[in-house]
Image (tube, rainbow, N blue to C red):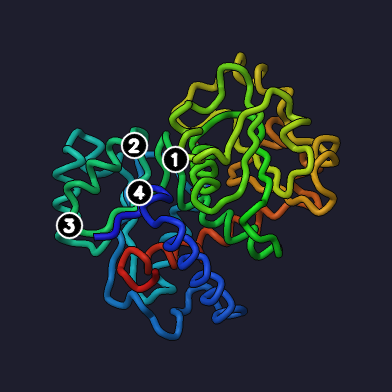
């Protein structure tokens, strides 16, 4: 059984195989209508359950469309309208969904719930974001970086702002794929030692945003208030010096690219000038959720890697 719970679930070889497959499949259907199935329809007859305990636009639509393009189908289950939202256990939900569907994606708060789902499911389980990590997002980010003509080994990625779930997965990717992450996060909002350890020595924290972006190939940030967190003025104030603006981008390499998983808050973590500017790859990054996840799904079914 192949669960995609974090990037380490696939490991370096699996990640490389997923990225190569995604590049091939994306090229093979360039210009096609989005809803047309790929010529080989490799997941024909397969259904994916998409369980959401938190909001989503990209993850929800890209997984649904991924299954359509692979020749299968998806069911979107908002937890609030299922018995999960009324206290049915994750374990029982896992057993029941395994009887109807061929794979389960879950977006939830506590990472332990994802692990419990995987423990009790008899079909592959995919992490669609937890408070701890967001590996599908980072697969799309790696695909976007490769498409921009940059190789992963030796790359310098700068992270600004909140030490959150998205940073945790970038750090994990750095350790597995041999690139470096330099994070400048506000006091009190730094990543945990455990998250940093997943970088296997490739990730470090610095105090100054300028130092983090100096010579960076990729500059990344994310919302300052993640889902499930209170909208705290104190947090916004603490993070204000970490905003990615044009002056900060100018300290990175001249050909540096800007990434953001979205949704974004222009004027908070990033200025409109940067996120809507020429160095920003955000729309390609968002589209690549679809292409990366098709290959993650194929990896789960043993078709890749
Ligand atoms: N980046 C991301 O996961 O977006 P959604 O919350 O819209 O799914
Ligand atoms: N860090 C953000 C990512 C949203 C895709 C959150 O968890 O809300």
Disc 1 crowd rating (10 Å Cα; few below 14, some 14-19, many 20+) is: many
Inspect this view and state whether residue 263 appears: yes
Between discs 1 and 4, the one toward the N terminus? 4
* Left or right: 80 in relation to 288: left
Write the residue at 70% across / 55% down.
281
Which residue is rendered at x = 70% and y = 43% of the image?
Answer: 219
Q: Which residue is mark 3?
A: 122
On screen, residue 40 versus residue 82, left or right, reads right
Marks 2 and 3: in contact by CB < 8 Å?
no
In 3D space, how far apart are the residues under numbered discs 1 and 4 (Cα atoms)?
A: 9 Å
N-terminal of the pair, mark 4 or mark 2, is: 4
What whole-number distance in Å separates the C-alpha atoms at marks 2 and 1? 8 Å
What whole-number distance in Å separates the C-alpha atoms at marks 4 and 3?
15 Å
The residue indicated by pointer 4 is 5
Distance of mark 3 from mark 1, alpha carbons? Answer: 23 Å
Say what secondary structure mark 3 lies in: loop
Q: Earlier in the sequence, mark 3 or mark 1?
A: 3
Return the mark for residue 269.
none
Front-lying residue, 128 or 186: 186
In primary-sequence order, the first of circles 2 and 1 is 2
For the C terminus, the quadrant is: bottom left
In the image, 151 versus 223, the foreground residue is 151
| Residue underneath mark 1 | 133
**View extreme (top): residue:** 234
Q: Determine which residue is flagged by label 2.
A: 111
């Amino acid at each position: 059984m192949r669960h995609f719970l974090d990037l380490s679930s696939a490991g370096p070889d699996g990640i490389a195989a997923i990225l190569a497959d995604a590049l091939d499949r994306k090229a093979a259907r360039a210009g096609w209508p989005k809803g047309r199935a790929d010529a080989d329809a490799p997941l024909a007859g397969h259904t994916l359950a998409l369980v959401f305990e938190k909001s989503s636009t990209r993850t929800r639509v890209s997984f649904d469309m991924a299954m359509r393009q692979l020749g299968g189908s998806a069911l979107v289950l908002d937890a609030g309208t299922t018995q999960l939202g009324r206290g049915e256990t994750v374990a029982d939900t896992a057993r029941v969904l395994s009887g109807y569907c061929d794979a389960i994606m879950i977006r939830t708060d506590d990472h332990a719930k994802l692990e419990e789902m995987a423990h009790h499911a008899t079909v592959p389980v995919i992490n669609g974001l937890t408070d701890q990590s967001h590996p599908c997002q980072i697969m799309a980010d790696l695909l976007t970086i490769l498409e921009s003509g940059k190789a992963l080994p030796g790359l310098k990625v700068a992270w600004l702002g909140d030490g959150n779930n998205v940073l945790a997965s970038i750090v994990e990717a750095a350790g597995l794929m041999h690139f470096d992450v330099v994070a400048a996060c506000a006091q009190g909002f730094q990543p945990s030692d455990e998250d940093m350890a997943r970088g296997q020595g490739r990730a470090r924290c610095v105090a100054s945003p300028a130092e983090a972006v100096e010579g960076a190939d990729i500059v990344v940030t994310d919302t300052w208030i993640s889902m499930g967190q209170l909208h705290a003025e104190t947090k916004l104030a603490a993070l204000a010096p970490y905003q990615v603006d044009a002056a900060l981008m100018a300290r990175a390499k001249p050909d540096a690219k800007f990434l953001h998983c979205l949704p974004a808050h222009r004027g908070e973590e990033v200025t409109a000038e940067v996120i809507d500017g020429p160095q920003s790859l955000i729309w390609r990054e968002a589209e690549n959720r679809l292409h990366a996840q098709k290959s993650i799904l194929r990896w789960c079914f043993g078709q890749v890697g």
